[in-house]
Amino acid sequence: WPWLLIGLGVVFSLFIVGATVGLPMLLLGAYMATATMTVNQCTRCGYYFKVLPE
């Protein structure tokens, strides 16, 4: 869903709210798309752990 966030960031930047909301969405989406590992939270204990790429 990083690509969805990038697309929404572009739409928000150009048409809806402007750079105040659109630019951070765009940057966050790009950061998520290029991340090498993911941090998830366990639903039972609340512990955060890293998921390494395969």
Image (tube, helix red, strand yellow):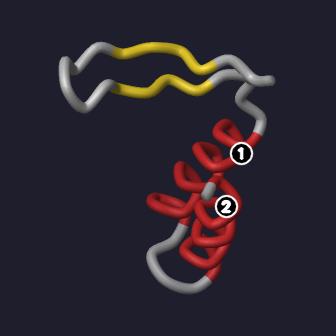
Instruction: Say the numbered circle drawn on residue 51.
Output: none
**Quarter in which the C terminus is drawn:** top right
Tell me the CA gap for discs 1 and 2: 7 Å
Q: Is the N terminus in the top left, top right, bottom left or bottom right quadrant?
A: bottom right
Q: Is residue 29 above or below residue 1?
A: above
50, 6: nearer the viewer: 50
Q: What is the secondary structure assignment of the residue under circle 1?
A: helix
Residue 46 sits above or below residue 30 on the image: above
- For residue 45, side relative to residue 36 (left or right): left
Residues 11 and 53: in front is 53
- The residue lying furthest to the front in this view is 44
Q: Do the residues under discs 1 and 2 have CB atoms within 8 angstroms?
A: yes
Could you say where residue 13 lies in the image, as x and y percent from the top left?
60, 71
The quarter of the displayed image where residue 23 is located: bottom right
Q: Is residue 30 left or right of residue 46?
A: right
Q: Identify the secondary structure beneath mark 2.
A: helix
Please provide percent x and percent y for residue 28.
58, 44
**Neighbour tally class for label 2: few under 14, some 14-19, many 20 plus, Cα within 10 Å:** many
In front here: 39 or 34? 39
Residue name at image x 64 percent, y 40 percent: 32
Upstream in sequence: badge 1 or badge 2:
2
Q: Residues within 10 Å of mark 1 (few under 14, many from 20)?
A: some
Residue 11 position in % (x across, y down) = 62, 78
At a point 59% along the width and 71% down the height, the residue shown is: 8
Furthest toward the bottom, the residue is 15
Residue ID at (67%, 61%): 6
Residue under label 1, please give it: 30
* Three-letter amino acid code of the residue under disc 2: Ile
Question: Which residue is at the far left?
Answer: 45
Residue 6's disc number: 2
Above or below residue 22? Residue 17 is: below
Amino acid type assigned to the residue bearing label 1 in the image:
Ala
